[in-house]
Image (cartoon, helix red, strand yellow):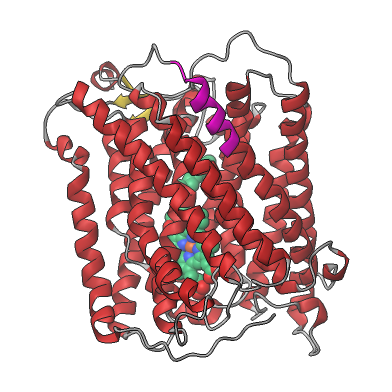
């Protein structure tokens, strides 16, 4: 171990002497706050959705919301797209800037922010007017108002601009640091966006070349199969665009916050490379779709188990970092270290609870990916059970935890309502456990997802009642957990005590740092991994596209307005 300890390094190239410019600070803060505002609107819709499963229909009482599907579309778009895009844009701009020791181009940050706000307005207005009740998957032949597709496109472009700002900063940094390893914190932040750049091409081209012109009557019809393929090409990888900003926090910040260290720089890089290379797995959302050969579904099944692997690497790395911290705090025995983590710090407790929720979240993902199990649970509440443990917990709870130190860092104000902040992650966590138990058990009994169960005109199966009640109770507790979070942030912004200095970001050290020579250097050759990713994409999607194209634009629209 002593040789390992000697090799410890910071995860940024120059650990000192960096000042975030006022413009960078302002735009990053706006991103973070805008994302939480979107979340606040979205979770309110989610609360009502949860009650629907308990047999309580409140849709007609909501201002501006007339139907179940309007509410579900608003919930999905605001929480899965706008909240996550805004947080990732702000958070990973900060980590990139700090790691490279240079501010990102603030004009690009401003442009990205404006496009995201405009995108939200363009997509949001038709949703709230009932002209885009197409859910967040916007499958044709369901047709929305053109403004919805335009708004989604703007939101995606805003993420590409952040990626451009990151790559620009990296290029400038490389000019001054020839032959040096990319600092780990920059590496993981930039790789997240590279993965997303490659992955977003599917849904972006669907949106821009098929759906937007179709909604403007410039195309004779839609091609549902091609659209679904393009959507899910992006639709699986978007989950890693949601998840990896949380991983950046788990790898780079949590070890330090619990008093530990990250074990290996290279292992972290390898995990992120796997997310970039294994992009083409979207067919696993289409196991039940006709028109896609079984050969490709099986190939993608194998790749999907492959892409679960970097999360297993992450589980190992982070659990080890937690153990180092817990033992340094006096924890003994096999699990005693776990109790010695700094649980009273909500920035830590929220994120460790997020990790614990991600254990069943990941396991249910692997169950989804298993072909025959998928035939049982597809289109049931098992799937939202899975994604509320992942997106709704691993990601959202992690952002809560990050906000508990990041908002004080960005505003220079101490966290307000500290006691509320200490309880908030536990309330949310309790809620998700009950909610997910309801959705998952109901799903196994065939309880359908995306269904206004409170008003169905057939008799539910016996097991659905308990499952639905648990979903409603858990969803209500989650909603209370969110309200507590928003209260803490609101009072921090208006009443938090001014701090003299905000200090530096709390990033970790690694035992096995970035090697200056040897095979690890290849990990920094970003273009190699991008090329490998495109080769794999061509192998998996090429045959489908070659046999299917040109698009079959013969499906008439179904337009509910
Ligand atoms: Fe998924 C459907 C497969 C991960 C989100 N997924 C969805 C949908 C969403 C979603 C939103 O194969 C629904 C889309 C829709 O509307 O139709 N998913 C997977 C697999 C993984 C996975 C294999 N999903 C995620 C993540 C998401 C997410 C992450 C959001 C952020 N998913 C599927 C499939 C479907 C699907 C099918 C289609 C279903 C259908 O039929 O429609 C894997 O990446 C999961 C790997 C994760 C792990 C867990 C590692 C654990 C860690 C925590 C460590 C804990 C520590 C603390 C350190 C293997 C890293 C512990 C300390 C202690 C002391 C215990």
Q: Which quadrant of the rendered structure holds the C terminus?
A: bottom right
The kind of secondary structure the magenta stretch mainly shows is: helix
The quarter of the picture where the N terminus appears is: top left
Residue 302 coordinates in the image, percent (x, y): 31, 69
Please tell me which residue lies in front, 220 or 253.
220
On the rendered structure, is 19 left or right of 404? left
In magenta segment, residue 24: yes
Name the residue rendered at 47%, 57% in the picture: 239
Residue range highlighted in magenta: 19-31
Q: Is residue 286 visible?
A: yes
Question: Percent position (x, y) of residue 31?
Answer: 57, 38
In the figure, is residue 488 to the left or right of 362?
right
| 212 to the left or right of 134 | left
Magenta run includes residue 107: no
Residue 171, above or below 273:
above
Q: Is residue 367 above or below residue 217?
A: above
Q: Which residue is at the front of the view, 165 or 218?
A: 218
Point out residue 409 in the picture as x, y percentages from the top left corner: 58, 22
């Amino acid at each position: 171990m002593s040789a390992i300890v000697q090799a410890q390094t910071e995860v940024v190239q120059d650990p000192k002497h960096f000042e975030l410019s006022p413009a960078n600070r302002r735009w990053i803060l706006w991103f973070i706050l805008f994302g939480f505002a979107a979340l606040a609107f979205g979770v309110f819709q989610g609360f009502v959705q949860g009650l629907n499963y308990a047999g309580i229909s409140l849709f007609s009482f909501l201002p501006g919301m007339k139907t179940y599907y309007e509410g579900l579309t608003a919930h999905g778009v605001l929480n899965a797209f706008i909240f996550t895009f805004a947080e990732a844009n702000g958070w990973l701009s900060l980590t990139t800037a700090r790691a490279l020791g240079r501010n990102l181009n603030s004009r690009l940050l401003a442009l990205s922010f404006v496009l995201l706000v405009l995108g939200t307005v363009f997509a949001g207005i038709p949703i709230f007017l009932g002209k885009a009740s197409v859910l967040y998957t916007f499958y044709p032949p369901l047709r929305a108002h053109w403004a919805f597709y335009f708004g989604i496109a703007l939101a995606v472009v805003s993420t590409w601009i952040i990626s451009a700002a990151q790559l620009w900063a990296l290029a400038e940094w490389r000019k001054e640091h020839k032959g040096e390893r990319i600092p780990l914190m920059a590496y993981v932040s930039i790789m997240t966006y590279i993965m997303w750049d490659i992955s977003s091409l599917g849904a972006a081209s669907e949106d821009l070349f098929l759906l937007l012109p179709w909604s403007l009557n410039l195309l004779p019809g839609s091609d549902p199969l091609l659209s679904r393929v393009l959507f899910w090409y992006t639709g699986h990888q978007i989950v890693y665009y949601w998840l990896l900003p949380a991983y950046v926090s788990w790898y780079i910040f949590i070890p330090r916050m619990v008093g530990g260290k990250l074990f290996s720089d290279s292992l972290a890089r390898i995990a992120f490379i796997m997310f970039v290379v294994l992009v083409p797995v979207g067919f696993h959302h289409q196991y039940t779709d006709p028109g896609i050969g079984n050969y490709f579904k099986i190939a993608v099944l194998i790749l999907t188990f492959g892409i679960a692997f970097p999360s297993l690497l992450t589980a190992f790395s982070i659990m080890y970092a937690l153990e180092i911290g817990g033992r340094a705090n006096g924890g003994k025995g096999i699990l005693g270290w776990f109790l010695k983590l700094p649980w009273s710090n909500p920035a830590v407790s929220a994120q460790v609870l997020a990790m614990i929720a991600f254990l069943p979240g990941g396991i249910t993902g692997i169950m989804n990916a298993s072909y025959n199990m998928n035939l049982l649970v597809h289109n049931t509440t098992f799937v939202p059970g899975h994604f509320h443990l992942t997106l709704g917990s691993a990601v959202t709870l992690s952002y809560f935890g990050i906000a508990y130190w990041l908002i004080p860092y960005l505003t220079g104000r101490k966290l307000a309502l500290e006691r509320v902040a200490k309880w908030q992650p536990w309330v949310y966590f309790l809620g998700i456990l009950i909610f997910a138990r309801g959705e998952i058990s109901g799903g196994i009994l065939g309880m359908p997802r995306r269904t206004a169960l409170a008003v169905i005109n057939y008799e539910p199966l016996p097991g659905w009642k308990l499952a639905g009640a648990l979903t409603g109770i858990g969803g209500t507790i989650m909603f209370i957990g969110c309200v507590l979070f928003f209260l803490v942030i609101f009072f921090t912004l208006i009443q938090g005590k001014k701090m003299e200095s905000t200090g530096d970001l709390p990033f970790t050290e690694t035992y096995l740092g970035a090697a200056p020579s040897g095979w690890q250097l290849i990990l920094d050759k970003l273009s190699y991994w991008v090329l490998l990713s495109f080769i794999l994409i061509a192998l998996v999607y090429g045959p489908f596209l070659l046999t299917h194209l040109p698009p079959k634009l013969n499906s008439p629209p179904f337009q509910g307005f």
